[in-house]
Amino acid sequence: MTTYARIFSFIRPYRLTLALSIVCSIFFSIFSGVSIYLIIPLLTTLFGGGSAGQPPAPPSPGSSFLPGWLVAAKDAATEAFRHAVFRADPADSLLNICVIIVSAFLLRNLFSYLQSNLMIYVEQGLTRDLRNSLYRHIHELPLAYFTNERTGNLISRIMNDVPVINTGISATFQTMIREPLLLLVYLTICLVLSWKLTVIAFIVFPVVLLVIAGVGRRVHKESGLAQERIADLTSVLHETISGVKVVKAFGMEEFENRKFSRESNSYFRTILRVTNIRNLASPTTEFLSAAAGGVIIWYGGLQVLGKSMEGSEFLGFLFAMFQLMPPIKELSNVNNRIQEASAAGKRVFEVLDTEPNIKDAADAVALPSFSSDIRFEGVSFRYGDGETVLDGITLKIRKGEVVAIVGPSGAGKSTLIDLVPRFYDPTGGRILIDGVDLRRVQLRSLRDKIGIVTQETILFNDTVRNNIAYGLEECPLEEIVDAARAANAHTFISEMPFGYDSVIGERGVKISGGERQRLALARAILKNPPVLILDEATSSLDTESEILVQEAIERLMAGRTSIVIAHRLSTVQHADRIVVIENGKIVETGKHDELIGKTRGLYRKLYQLQFRA
Ligand code: ATP
């Protein structure tokens, strides 16, 4: 399916509104034609008498090529109009015509207003739906996707590309329907008045069309570039704003400024180029139209001088001809807008088409509870096409056990624990929970059983209460308070201006590192999962804070199966088992006392290095 056809599939829910908008377009075009055509009797009244006694104007010789029925219809309409409007006194006729012209304009604008409003509803509805489905889809994408894709790029697709698709929609359903209808109406008027003049006017059109097509192709190419540039700009912006502390700490403001200037300059140049090309379309069309106008006035003027055309008809013709310009101008742009929209659509669908490879299998089973063990059987893993990060890991973690994972930096510890909640799937071997392959367990029921506390504590811009109860609906305050107490967080929360209803800023900037950790621990305690995955923070806290955090961790681990990337002395010493990883392989396992006794063991070496203090 082409990109454009796919965009249309999002319009389905709005087809009734769209149909109404098209009906309004039709009426708008009809009343636009009527209001222009009425110029002729107006001029006749002003300059040619226009009383009821006057004989009807003979059919224009210029319209002799038209089908008989059309000429007859035109004559009948003219006659009926004369009868209804023209009075013996030209002043009365004038008043009648003016009333009719004003009414026609009123109706024309009323339908224009209705049409625009209906169209906006469709456009904005479509934007909302597309954004929502993108957002929903992003949540289904595996973690790997986010490490490969820049955040700003993704944000830009949702915020900047979706509205561009919109302009394509309005181009299609507003411009492509309304403007051709207007063209048809005005063109019919022109043809009825003088087909020869019309033909002459239209000789220039193929030339205009050729120019437009060329410009359209360029715009398509360049606008894709412009959207990429704005995505780059958004990326830089996002990175520096979220990393503002690092930028300041390293005094990199100037460096970042230069980087931003470079990107924004690049966008500036691209957008100038696109706009330049797009702007070229309008004046070119206009000039070509003006040239045609000169020829028409000359030829038409000769007809009037030669008495083969009424002066009022010629002026009516000119009015209709001028009215042809705006629709042609709009239509000359329409191709560009559609091209831009389909380029933006392509980027949006790229995201939507990324298959979430970590999802429930068709025969996935729900995990009622965690009752026995988690087993790694010959598990290997690599990121994309990269090096092997985990290699033949075989490990059994029994219910209730505390397993500490220890190893040098880059050994694969975080990767190992990320496999348990299925953030990634192993590339070799398998992981079983209570004897069922993780890939056959419903994701939701698996993740329900697991609590994760990582080093990077993400707190949402919300109240303390909602941050602790994240993921739990309608959790009573008492339970939240209990969890906070167990995490040694209650005291500092109570000292906040609004207690549990205090809002903590993005990533909890308004609270200290230790407090943040304790909030994350409270969150895990409240969730009360049977399995706990803990990546202990490496950053050192002051002694008091350290003791508070340590107590909270101990309470959290009590009675749970815990897999801990251990950085704390007490966790390592009290673990039921320590698993030492080096280069993606398990090199030692055992209790602290056993491992520390191995004189050449890696654990002993790491222990001495890490915990010497
Ligand atoms: P540390 O103690 O420093 O956190 P670790 O033992 O937890 O290290 P991992 O984070 O699991 O190690 O990383 C293992 C290897 O995988 C490293 O070489 C790392 O560069 C690589 N790696 C980690 N995450 C990714 C990723 N998202 N994409 C590609 N490679 C990755």
Image: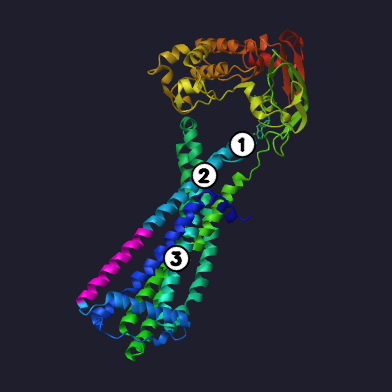
In the image, residue 283 lies at what x, y percent? 41, 69
Q: CA distance from mark 3 to mark 1?
A: 42 Å
Q: Amino acid at mark 2?
A: Asp
Counting from the top left corner in percent of width and height, residue 564 is at: 65, 18
In x, y percent, where is residue 485?
50, 11
Residue 201, horizontal then vertical, whole percent? 43, 79
Nearest to the observer: residue 452 or residue 330:
330
Residue 329 vertical placement versus 318 (above, below): above
Sequence-wise, the earlier of marks 3 and 1 is 1
Three-letter residue code for mark 3:
Glu
Which residue lies under the disc numbered 1?
140
Is residue 212 shown in magenta? no
Q: Nearer the viewer, residue 8 or 402?
A: 8
Taking the image in four quarters, ligand 1 sits in the one at top right
- First in sequence, mark 1 or 2: give its number: 2
Instruction: Give the magenta range.
Output: 91-111
Disc 1 crowd rating (10 Å Cα; few below 14, some 14-19, many 20+) is some
Magenta-highlighted stretch: main secondary structure?
helix
Inspect the magenta stretch and tell me whether residue 106 lies in it.
yes
| Residue displayed at 47% across by 24% down | 508
Which secondary structure, mark 1?
helix
Mark 1–mark 2 CB contact (< 8 Å): no
| Badge number at residue 271 | none
Q: Which residue is mark 3?
A: 179
In the depicted view, which residue is nearer to us: 273 or 196? 196
Displayed quadrant of residue 556: top right
Query: What residue is at 58 percent from the left and 23 percent from the top?
Result: 455
Q: Residue at x 49, y 33 (%)?
A: 242
* Observer able to see residue 123: yes
